[in-house]
Amino acid sequence: MTTIGDVAKAAGVSVATVSRALRGVDRVSPRTRERVLAAATELHYVASPAATSLVSGRTRGIGVITPYFNRWFFATVVTGIEKALRDDGHHVLLCDLESHTFDTRLPITQSMLWKRVDGVIILNVPPDAQERDLLDRMGLPVVTVGNRQPGWPSVRIDDRAAMSMAVEYVVGLGHRDIAYAGTVPSSVSHLQTPFDRRHAFDEVLAAHGIRNRPEWTLRCDWTADGAAEHADRLFAGSDRPTCVVAASDEMAFGVMSAARRHGLDVPGDVSVIGIDDHVHSRIHDLTTVRQDVEAQGRHAGSLMLAALHGHEVSSSHDEVLGVELVVRGSTAPPKKQARPSQTTGRPTRTRTAPKASASGAVQATA
Amino acid sequence: MTTIGDVAKAAGVSVATVSRALRGVDRVSPRTRERVLAAATELHYVASPAATSLVSGRTRGIGVITPYFNRWFFATVVTGIEKALRDDGHHVLLCDLESHTFDTRLPITQSMLWKRVDGVIILNVPPDAQERDLLDRMGLPVVTVGNRQPGWPSVRIDDRAAMSMAVEYVVGLGHRDIAYAGTVPSSVSHLQTPFDRRHAFDEVLAAHGIRNRPEWTLRCDWTADGAAEHADRLFAGSDRPTCVVAASDEMAFGVMSAARRHGLDVPGDVSVIGIDDHVHSRIHDLTTVRQDVEAQGRHAGSLMLAALHGHEVSSSHDEVLGVELVVRGSTAPPKKQARPSQTTGRPTRTRTAPKASASGAVQATA
DNA sequence: TTGAAAGCGATACCAC
DNA sequence: GTGGTATCGCTTTCAA
């Protein structure tokens, strides 16, 4: 383990000079710098992060808190975050909340994060009061992805707009008997995405005077398997919808699978639409509302870096990325009693919603 | 930021005593300890990792190097690693190699890892000479997952056995016209999993005297989309296989999708089998060879912790987890010229291969 | 432009 | 059982 002292000795200068020369900043004569650089390279010198951190107070680490990071959405966000951070020499400390209740969560994040990171990025999960308190006490910059939290900047899509886009599309195709997959999990309250998407679904149905049948709500857990199971029961009955709107593509996959198992043709007998544009959506030929997940991660990372570099990031900064409808083969007008409204046949291949937004205000994309 | 000094002052003792009391070890009178604990709690004291690390030389961080973190397999392994580490107060530093060539890889891992972690877990990607050199110089314990590297302990499945199991099964069903999805990517040589699986495929075919047709090898990139694309071309021709063996479930999904697009029934017209038991395999009703991916992560994490705690971990330690055949609906005997050999009809629901293994030797599961 | 020295916050050795 | 203090490796005044 070569230290700064070794380099100083080898270059015939003081440790102070080595420190200055290596960090580029500060005035050091070119000749000296060169000698120091050569010695450092020669000795494979890399400054000890612990020592640097001790004196500077910065760790170059960013904590990323996620529920389930082995789910495609979260893993992809993390990928984006990591890319953005790495270019600036920062790295990601992973903190997976999977299977941890709110009770056991606090000590974990506390010991994990305390003085270990320069900032925290929180994906989708809303912190409780104690956690907010902890984060505030640490005085760390926080960025949230996927949901809006008062006091912290955020990066996300407009979930209501996304869902509206999906529902409007199938309604436009003539569907009136529409089921919904993906309720708000009761265990974790205040999860905005499930709530907002459901809300938008209800609203669009109401706006069109379409009956919203509670027995057609698949109260599943946002997994493909869960959705398949619930859709299985739905399709087993004789009273079936002509269309299922899934709050996520993974659930849509499950629904399509169940439909197939019941001998139902998609989209002949039942249309299916999702939200996400999951990496597998193309092979499923699933019509969906695309969001750029990795971009959300990248933006969150950049935002964090900006805050770290002292660029003031408003706590009301709310970056809303655009979404677009991607029409594939899983949707079609309903077979019987088709009464197409505004949209006839298939629209153009994709419809784009306004992208990105300014700071400080949600950009409506509905 | 309350320091150990603040706690000492509050408790009316010296910093040395606080340090001892808080870490439990060492002799401290119960009364004193109590006072210190109270003061620490009161002040929300948590020891600075940087300072601790500086003197102890340990960071409680483990670097995890992965290609493509947003792929299900790798994210799931990392989940397992994280769980194992967290219980011991360690955390994961993520290093995603996606889209980085060997050229740009070295500096990344160097700056990322140097003195920042107590150990490194490498998933599937073989380090090049320079990286090995770096790792050796750092003197860090290393554990590999998914492939065997000389000098480092590993956790993995027996890829050849897994593939053999898959191929033997479809051959047993009577298939003789068998295609293969998933070649060795030319850009990253020495990737054992692709190589081993392919090798086993060839071997089983040869052992049964089955013709191995090069034009039926889908040279795809281990993604569902890639496999779908290649399978598309395969199914477009008139000379079609009765079965496709995919080296991963995700590729199998792509193949099934392509088959469906060509109006081919699975398994009526073509059987498909994969390896992994991906989280979506159930909804695809895919027959596959299951591996416990998260367990591999957990075992790797435990192995690392053992090494960190000074329990000697042999560098020849090679932990091979068992796999099992999971028969679902994507496989059936070929329609025409079916000449079933040893296996008739469907076997029991699953066939289990011997699980786990002792240290120091590969356990054959073929 | 360069060097000496004072911390940063904890641990551990050595007295008491 | 408890308290000083040297020490870890680096950054950063302050002088020279």
Image: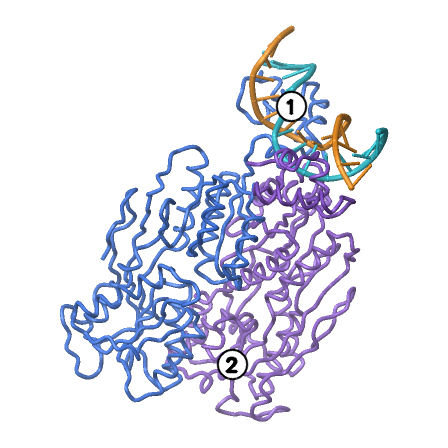
Chain colours: A blue, B purple, C cyan, D orange
Dot 1 crowding, Cα within 10 Å, few <14, some 14–19, many 20+ = many
Residue drawn at x 36%, y 87% as measured from the top left: A236
Choose top left, top right, bottom left or bottom right for residue A353: bottom left
Q: CA distance from mark 1 to mark 2?
A: 64 Å
Q: Are marks 1 and 2 on the same chain?
A: no
Q: Amino acid at mark 2?
A: Cys
Residue drawn at x 57%, y 36% as measured from the top left: B2
* Relative depth, front residue between A61 and B224: A61
* Relative depth, front residue between B24 and B166: B24
- Residue underneath mark 2: B243
- Residue underneath mark 1: A36
Q: Position of residue B184 (x, y in %)?
A: 58, 63
- Answer above or below: position of B123 versus B352: above
Q: Amino acid at mark 1?
A: Val
Q: Chain of mark 1?
A: A
Q: Position of residue A89 (x, y in %)?
A: 53, 39
